[in-house]
């Protein structure tokens, strides 16, 4: 039987969806995707159904033995979302020719992670349409699909990256060295670089730093012992005792040589490149968690090495037209202000500040918990 459906084309209004992680006016628990479907028929046909479906899938692979990949790899797949709607309430006849239908699909988005494509992990979304025609022996159908990219941002706009609040970490090695590092609360991937600063104060001769190594650790934690979400039976065999696998990817090691100085106080200007295709935004989902830590290794003249570790959030900002000139002052000194970047009451997007009003300490500086203490003895080298 020749299928009367000649072709089906799907035209969503966008294939890029911007979601936001932080609590605030831009964060939403649901999202809508709209578009049109065009069906071309070769003859008079009864269409039984037209289905629109959005599907999100997370896939991970655990490489037990890199030298024998196919025999030892364990794969896991999780369905993150599966939303479906029908455009027809009942079967309807249509004449030969082209027919266009409009559609709007709403779906929960509160826990959806962003689209990623890493060597061991992939999170992908797609929108599809399936048209089912009437038939005697079987019901001919035709379907097509398009990839959809979901971005989850923690910045309302790219230019707000300059106003991300800083966190300052302090500590010391008793009676020898005191350190202080100040870094932004998060790093923006589109900038391709993360800049931060530090200060070292030596109490004794021989405790001056001569070199600092900087590295980013990307910790990927995923499960191999759960069934596909929404399904009753698992799609793979249980292979790990607890089903949880953690993999660390070391990214962007950079070394900075420090010029010798007679001063016991050393000021540091450091950076970390974020241009590697292995870098992923920080994310948390039912199938995969990705977190980051900034690792520092300090080498001294005669003092033993010091290793420091700081948590770091890597995020993105929605694509936008380049600004003719950046704003002259922060849109807001509170977190929701630099997250949103949207203030309707003032055209220039800047809160009026009284000349007599001074910012509070909390407005300009926020201190977190101290970093992991330096390791006097390392069982394994931090850098290889």
Image: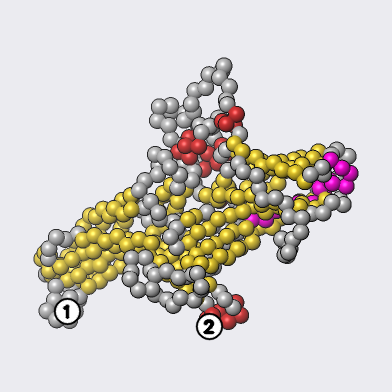
SS label for mark 2: helix
Camera-nearest residue between 335 and 52 = 335
SS label for mark 1: loop
**Residue 61 vertical position relative to residue 266 in the rendered view, above or below:** below
Name which residue lies at 49% across and 43% down: 155
**Circle 2 residue:** 71
Name the spot of residue 81 as percent of width and height, x first.
35, 61
Query: Can you see residue 380?
Result: yes
Mark found first going from the N terminus, 2 or 1: 2
Q: Which residues are magenta?
A: 203-216
Is residue 90 left or right of 148 when viewed as pictured? left
Q: Marks 2 and 1, Cα distance to the nearest angstrom?
A: 40 Å
Q: Is residue 275 magenta?
A: no
Name which residue lies at 57% across and 16% down: 356
Name which residue lies at 51% across and 49% down: 316
**Residue 138, numbered label:** 1
């Amino acid at each position: 039987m020749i299928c009367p459906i000649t072709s089906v084309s799907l035209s969503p209004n966008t294939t890029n969806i911007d979601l936001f992680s932080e609590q605030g006016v831009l964060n939403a628990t649901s999202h809508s995707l709209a578009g049109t479907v065009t069906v071309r028929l070769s003859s008079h046909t009864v269409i039984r159904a037209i289905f629109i479906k959005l599907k999100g899938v997370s896939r991970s692979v655990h490489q037990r033995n890199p030298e024998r990949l196919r025999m030892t790899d364990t794969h896991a797949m999780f369905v993150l979302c599966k939303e479906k709607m029908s455009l027809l309430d009942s079967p309807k006849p249509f004449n030969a020719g082209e027919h266009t239908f409009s559609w709007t699909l709403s779906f929960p988005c509160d826990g959806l992670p962003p689209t990623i494509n890493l060597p061991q992990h992939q999170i992908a979304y797609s929108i599809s349409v399936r048209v089912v025609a009437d038939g005697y022996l079987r019901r001919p159908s035709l379907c097509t699909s398009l990839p959809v990219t979901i971005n989850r941002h923690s910045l309302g706009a790219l230019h707000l990256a300059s106003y991300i609040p800083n966190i300052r970490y302090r500590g010391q090695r008793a009676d020898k060295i005191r350190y202080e590092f100040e870094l932004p609360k998060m790093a923006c991937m589109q900038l391709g670089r993360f800049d931060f600063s530090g200060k070292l104060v030596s109490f004794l001769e021989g405790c001056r730093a001569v070199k600092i190594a900087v590295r980013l650790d990307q910790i990927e934690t995923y499960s191999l012992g759960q069934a596909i979400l929404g399904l009753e039976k698992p799609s793979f065999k249980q292979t790990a005792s607890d089903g949880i696998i953690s993999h660390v990817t070391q990214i962007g090691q950079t070394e900075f040589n420090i010029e010798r100085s007679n001063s016991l106080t050393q000021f540091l200007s450091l950076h970390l490149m974020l241009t590697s295709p292995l870098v992923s935004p920080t994310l948390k989902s039912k199938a995969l968690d990705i977190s980051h830590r900034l690792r520092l290794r300090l080498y001294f003249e005669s003092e033993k090495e010091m290793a420091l570790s700081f948590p770091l959030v890597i995020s993105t900002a929605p694509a936008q037209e380049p600004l003719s000139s950046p704003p002259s002052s922060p849109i807001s000194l509170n977190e929701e202000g630099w997250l949103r970047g949207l203030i309707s009451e003032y055209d220039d997007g800047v809160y009026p500040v009284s000349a007599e009003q001074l910012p509070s300490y909390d407005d300009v500086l926020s201190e977190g918990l101290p970093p992991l203490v330096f390791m006097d003895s390392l069982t394994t080298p931090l850098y290889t």
